[in-house]
Image (cartoon, grey):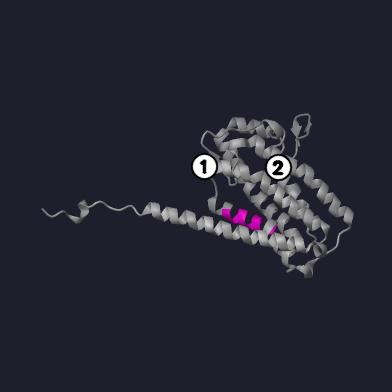
């Protein structure tokens, strides 16, 4: 008896396709990583033209990556219960990557924006370098205190917890506070009107847009517990209480 074509086993082509996508992503990351390392090498070679403070900025970016990569790796395999504003998130994160890393690095490596250079006194660059010390401590501590609840995008993990201990006991967004400090040092270390200001400008836009729906998501998830937490903490620095009012 002849078998109908519909009775024949259907080959699942999705797994090879998914495998091909993973390999493609890996290849893209390797190529981008090599380009990044090449730009870092060129920027180091041009340190005399860019000033000693450019080396501080490069070191700071390396420290930031060293702190974040282990937490990002752990978070990658954890199941996600809810994501907010996915397309908006991608645009905001891409703009911060462009302004906070790509443009400064390309400028330091090639001098493409030399027409917009300015010279600040050495003490200003030293202030920027000193500010990075507490900024990176806070950046590390906020990752450590969040633990498995941290993610790069605005999302809730399965069994997500409201973290109110450690640096989160007085500040709701210590990681944003740390990143603000890091980006505010950028114009002091990368002394260029384009490359220096691109970081704080792009991060300011992301913060202004993201903070609203991030806190709305937390309020929807944790309800009264989060509202109480908001009342006793500040967003970026510890709240100051005068009588019944909190600032």
Please tell me the numbered disc located at residue 93. none
- The residue at which mark 1 appears reads as 77
Q: Magenta region: which residues?
A: 90-99
Query: Is 131 a magenta residue?
Result: no
Q: Residue at x 74, y 49 (%)?
A: 182
Q: In x, y percent, where is residue 16?
A: 39, 54
Sort mark 1 into few (<14), some (14-19) or many (20+) by Cα contacts within 10 Å.
Answer: few
Give coordinates of residue 90: x percent, y percent: 57, 54
- Residue 103 in sight in this render: no
Residue 124 appears left or right of 67 = right
At 69% from the left and 53% from the top, the residue drawn is 203
- Quadrant where the C terminus sits is top right
Mark 2 residue element: helix
User: Residue 99, position in %: x, y?
Assistant: 68, 58
192 or 47: nearer the viewer: 47
244 in relation to 56, above or below: above
Q: Which residue is tagged 2?
A: 139
């Amino acid at each position: 008896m002849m078998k109908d074509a519909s009775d024949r086993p259907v080959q699942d082509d999705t797994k090879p396709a998914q495998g091909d996508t993973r390999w493609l992503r890996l290849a893209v990351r390797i190529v981008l990583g090599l380009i990044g390392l090449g730009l870092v090498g060129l920027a180091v070679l041009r340190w005399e033209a860019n000033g000693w403070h450019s080396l501080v900025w490069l070191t700071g970016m390396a420290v930031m990556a060293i702190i974040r990569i282990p937490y990002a790796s752990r978070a990658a395999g954890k199941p996600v219960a809810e994501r907010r504003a996915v397309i908006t998130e991608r645009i905001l994160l891409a703009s911060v990557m462009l302004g906070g890393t790509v443009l400064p690095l390309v400028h330091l490596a090639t001098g493409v924006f030399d027409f917009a250079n300015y010279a600040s006194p050495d003490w200003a660059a030293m202030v920027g370098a000193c500010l990075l010390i507490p900024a990176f401590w806070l950046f590390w501590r906020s990752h450590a205190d969040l633990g498995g609840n941290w993610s790069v995008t605005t999302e809730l993990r399965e069994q997500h917890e409201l973290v109110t201990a450690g640096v989160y006991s007085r500040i709701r967004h210590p990681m944003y506070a740390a990143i603000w400090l890091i980006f505010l040092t950028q114009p002091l270390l990368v002394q260029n009107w384009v490359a220096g200001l691109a970081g704080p400008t792009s991060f300011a836009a992301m913060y202004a847009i993201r903070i609203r729906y991030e806190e709305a998501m937390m309020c929807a998830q944790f309800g009264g517990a989060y509202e109480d937490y908001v009342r006793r903490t500040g967003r970026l620095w510890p709240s100051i209480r005068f009588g019944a009012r909190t600032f």
